[in-house]
Image (cartoon, rainbow, N blue to C red):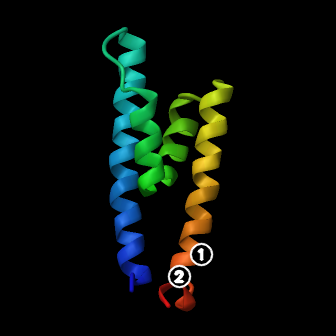
Amino acid sequence: MITFQAGLIYCLILSFITFIVYWKDKRASIKGTWRTPEKTLHTLAFLGGWPGALLAQRLFRHKTSKFRFQFVFWLIVIINCIGTVLIQNPDFYM
């Protein structure tokens, strides 16, 4: 069973990594250099880094006006929240 503490540490580490990737992508967009693919940003969010992605989006005003990107992002957040509730449910493993 996944403990709450292990899940929280995993989420914090992945959120930090995701935040850094968003920051680098924002810098690249300003400089006009190679960008991180949106698929990579979504994958990091899906794997549990969505809190870091959300923070980076708000702080850097990055990817906030792209409707399609935001739609997929919020769908990922909802899936993650539902998954977290299911995993923390003791009957999930039976």
Does dot 2 land on a helix, a strand or a loop? helix
Residue for badge 1: 85
Would you say 64 lies left or right of 31 here? right
Disc ID at residue 72: none
Q: Residue 89 appears in which quarter of the rendering?
A: bottom right
Measure how far apart labels 2 and 1 are at the Cα level: 5 Å
* Direction from residue 28 to residue 64 in the image, left or right: right
Tell which of 4 and 40 is nearer to you.
Answer: 40
Marking on residue 88? 2
Residue type highlighted by circle 1: Val
Question: Splitting the image into 4 quarters, where does residue 57 fall?
Answer: top right
State yes or no: discs 2 and 1 in contact (Cβ < 8 Å).
Answer: yes
- The crowd level at tag 1 (other Cα within 10 Å; few <14, some 14-19, many 20+) is few
Q: Secondary structure at mark 1?
A: helix
Q: Give the camera-side residue of 17 and 60.
A: 17
Count of labels in the image: 2
